[in-house]
Amino acid sequence: MGRSSRRSDCRERADSAGHVSPHRVPQADFDRVAQAVNALPEVAHNYERDHEFNMWFVLATESHDDIARAATQIERTTGLPVYLMPKREEFFVGLNLAAHA
């Protein structure tokens, strides 16, 4: 993968609404769509994938109504459908690194 459209300045809360959304984005439009998606503060993460659904992003808000509004805005801006898959379960991964002086 040559490009990444990662964004992570939106913090997800355990009690928030969260949905992952896969997109089929024509390669010629990828940068334009990534820029439009990443412009929304509700977008927590956005990654390019080597798959038919080549853009995956996470919407994280305090309510499901806010998710719907963000999804509608993305559809209007990009002209592409937004498929929402709600968060059903959270997983926490611990990572411990040794610090050497």
Image (tube, rainbow, N blue to C red):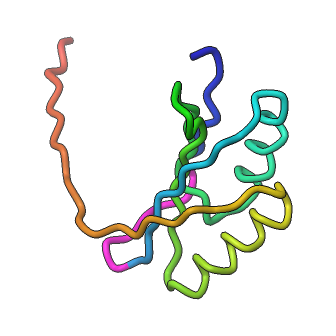
The residue closer to the viewer here, 99 or 21, is: 21
Residue 35, image x and y in percent? 79, 44
Q: Could you tell me which residue is drawn at 64 percent across and 62 percent down?
A: 82
**Frontmost residue, 11 versus 59:** 59
Quarter that holds the C terminus: top left
Main secondary-structure element of the magenta-colored stretch: loop
Which quadrant holds the N terminus? top right
Question: How many numbered badges does the structure rendering display?
Answer: 0
Stretch in magenta = 9-15
Where is residue 45? Give x, y as percent: 53, 48
Does the magenta segment cover residue 14? yes
Q: Answer above or below: position of 53 versus 20.
A: above
- The answer to whether 71 is drawn above or below residue 69 in the figure is above
As drawn, is 5 to the left or to the right of 99?
right
| Residue at the (31%, 72%) spot, across then down | 14
Residue 72 percent across, percent down from the top left: 73, 74
Residue at left 61%, top 65%? 42
Q: Which residue corresponds to the image point at 65% horizontal and 22% vertical from the top-left?
A: 3
